[in-house]
Amino acid sequence: MINDIDRSIIQATQTGLPLTSRPYHTIAEQLNLTVDEVMERLQKMLDEGIIRRIGVVPNHYALGYRYNGMTVWDVPDEQIDYLGKTVGALKFVSHCYHRPRHLPEWPYNLFAMVHGKTQTQVEQQSQQIATLLGKYNRDHKILYSTRILKKTGLRI
């Protein structure tokens, strides 16, 4: 359960942090709280699983990255944790995760999102992943975004 103060913090941040140099200070001022209290309560909500994460959700298109490719990989299941961490650590991979296969139509179990200003750049990044995966890369594809999906977080 959340109390009224936690609810007010969630409501103040649910559409994003204020675009100021000190967003937690701005929230604290709006809610008549101390900055420490805002940060401690957010950390407690994270620790308790009330909120999952606090992170940046960039608009890649607005930043000039017109080619957004979800690279999908067929790798051995027994290597998925190691390979996922390795691929996810690449600077150009924005997120990487394990998904179930749907055989026989869909053999892919490792997904890694990459962004580029050109299709060639995305293809080069995909090739770098392929090289990194080496013998574990049994097959892969690049699925390009065709539209922007609205991303939202927790809403109260």
Image: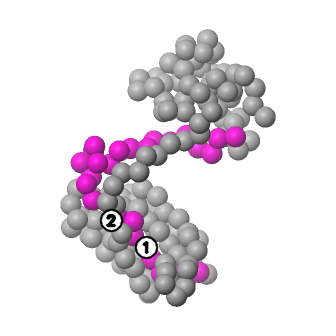
Residue 14 lies, with reference to residue 34, above or below; the image says: below
Task: Name the residue rendered at 21%, 60% in the picture.
Answer: 118
Which one is closest to the eye, mark 2 or mark 1?
A: 2
Picture coordinates of residue 19 (x, y %)? 41, 27
Q: Can you tell which quarter of the image residue 53 is in?
A: top right
**Side (left or right) of 43 relative to 26:** right
Q: Which residue is mark 1?
A: 72
Q: Is residue 47 visible?
A: no
Image quadrant holding the C terminus, namely: top right
Task: Name the residue rendered at 74%, 41% in the picture.
Answer: 48
Q: Can you tell which quarter of the image residue 51 is in?
A: top right
Q: Nearer the viewer, residue 52 or 88?
A: 52
Q: Nearer the viewer, residue 35 or 5?
A: 5
Q: Pointer 1: residues within 10 angstroms few (<14), some, or many (20+)?
A: many
Amino acid under disc 1: Val
Residue 150 lies, with reference to residue 45, above or below; the image says: below
Circle on res. 144: 2
**Element at label 2:** strand
Picture coordinates of residue 28 (x, y %)? 57, 17
For residue 51: magenta?
yes
Magenta stretch, main secondary structure, is loop
